[in-house]
Image (tube, rainbow, N blue to C red):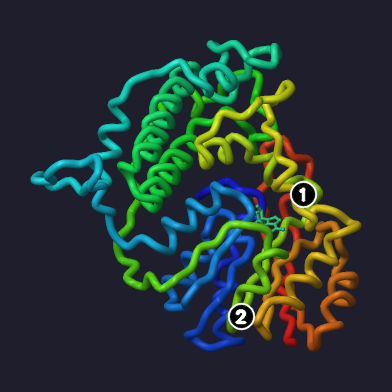
């Protein structure tokens, strides 16, 4: 499972049941803070047409893979004949795995072998060899993109595959907010790209967008909109900056001890007490949609009462309370058991 704050894998049955109850078994569902794409994928599997988006670039790539692909793309610009039993995607992944090492951005900024450009101590997000492997793969993907040898969806698939591999060997306690001082067992394993399974999802009538929900809402028409906002002050852009850098394929200034990129352009108002409710209001008001399903956590920034008061301006509000075992980082002092709210708003 993808370790991501607020990942809804465990809540999928509740979300799908509620969706069925509210709009039946067909229709268009918007998932406008889609994160890992877990909910979007499940909606696709259940036969809904999905409009999915998020403000983070890595999420965009996950969504392209989860919603727009149903088999290996051709990779015609980089793969010759595929005579053997391998798909073009498997061939490309094999090629990338065999590339070897390169001393590049990840090596310098995120591994103990490198020298940080900021002059901070070497960072330990990855072993030196894994960081050098990431550099080789990243630069190869960038070259293919620059030469237009792979399509946008093919690039998304390769970046998605790299991010999943990076998550397996990252030396972190849950998020990329900081690295661990000693390499833990999984981080010492060699980084290997593993092709993801793309079969069995025939339904590909979906839309993937990237951006702030507040900005995209007016352009979206749906029968139901699922909103799964951040519920804490912790910004996703800061906690997953390493994945964002892989997703963008860029070489940003890595600042301070943790090597954070500048993330202000992806700062979420949902993580603030002062602006969060205004953002809910703007999304619900502007989207062409009459039914909203909102996930929220018992220990979120806003109390259930505050949320209900905000949503009641639009119409009828109904709350389902689910007992839940949450994802937390290993060193988190937060309790593991808590309640998750599924709030329905009918305009
Ligand atoms: C709780 S997570 C969603 C988890 C997702 N349902 C899953 O299962 O992986 C919240 C997501 O909201 C995104 N986000 C935060 N503020 C946003 C905004 N204003 N517009 C769009 N996405 C936003 C974050 O990047 C994050 O991926």
- How far is the residue under mark 1 from the one under mark 2? 32 Å
Q: Circle 1 sits on which residue?
A: 335
For image coordinates 48% across by 40% down, the residue present is 163
Q: Is residue 20 above or below residue 116?
A: below
29 relative to 296, above or below: below
Observer-nearest of 176 and 77: 77
**Could you tell me which quadrant the C terminus lies in?**
bottom right
- As drawn, the label of residue 224 is 2
- Ligand 1, by image quadrant, is bottom right
Residue furthest front as drawn: 147
Disc 1 vs disc 2: Cβ atoms closer than 8 Å?
no
* Drawn side of residue 31 relative to residue 127, left or right: right
Q: Write the residue at 63% across / 15% down.
A: 116
Q: Report if the beta carbon of the residue with label 1 is closer than 8 angstroms to ligand 1.
A: no
Residue 157: % across, % down: 39, 48
Q: Is residue 201 visible?
A: yes
Say which element carries label 2.
Answer: strand
In the displayed structure, does residue 104 sit left or right of residue 147?
Answer: right
Relative horizontal placement of residue 277, taking residue 11 as reference (left or right): right
Q: Is residue 229 above or below residue 235?
A: below
Dot 1 alpha-carbon crowd within 10 angstroms: few under 14, some 14 to 19, many 20 or more: few
Query: Which of marks 2 and 1 precedes in the sequence?
Result: 2
Q: Nearer the viewer, residue 140 or 101?
A: 140
């Amino acid at each position: 499972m993808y370790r991501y704050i607020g990942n809804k894998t465990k809540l999928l049955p509740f979300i799908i049941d509620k969706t069925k109850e509210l709009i039946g078994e067909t229709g268009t569902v918007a998932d406008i803070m889609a994160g890992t794409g877990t909910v979007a994928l499940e909606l696709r599997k259940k036969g809904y047409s999905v409009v999915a988006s998020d403000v983070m670039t890595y999420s965009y790539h996950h969504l392209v893979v989860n919603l727009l692909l149903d088999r290996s793309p051709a990779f015609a610009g980089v793969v010759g004949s595929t005579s053997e039993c391998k798909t073009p995607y498997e061939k490309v992944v094999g090629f990338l795995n065999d590339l070897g090492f390169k001393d590049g951005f990840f090596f310098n900024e995120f591994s103990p072998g490198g020298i940080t450009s900021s002059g901070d101590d070497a960072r330990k997000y990855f072993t030196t060899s894994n960081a050098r492997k990431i550099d080789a793969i990243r630069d190869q993907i960038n070259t293919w993109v620059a030469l237009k040898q792979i399509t946008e969806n093919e690039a998304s698939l390769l970046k998605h595959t790299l991010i999943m591999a990076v998550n397996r060997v990252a030396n972190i306690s849950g998020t990329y907010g900081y690295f661990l001082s000693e390499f833990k067992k999984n981080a010492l394993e060699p980084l290997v790209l593993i092709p993801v399974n793309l079969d069995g999802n025939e339904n590909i009538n979906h839309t993937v967008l990237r951006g702030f929900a507040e900005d995209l809402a007016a352009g979206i028409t749906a029968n139901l909109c699922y909103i799964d906002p951040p519920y804490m002050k912790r910004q996703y852009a800061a906690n997953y900056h390493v994945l964002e850098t892989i997703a963008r394929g860029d070489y940003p200034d890595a600042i301070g001890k943790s090597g954070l990129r500048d993330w202000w352009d992806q700062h979420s108002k949902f993580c603030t007490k002062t602006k969060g409710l205004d953002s809910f209001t703007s999304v619900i008001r502007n989207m062409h949609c009459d039914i909203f399903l909102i996930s929220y956590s018992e220990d979120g920034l806003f109390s259930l009462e505050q949320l209900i008061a905000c949503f009641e301006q639009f119409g009828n509000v109904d709350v389902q309370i689910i007992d839940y075992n949450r994802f937390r980082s290993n060193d988190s002092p937060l309790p593991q058991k808590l309640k998750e709210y599924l709030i329905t708003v009918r305009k």
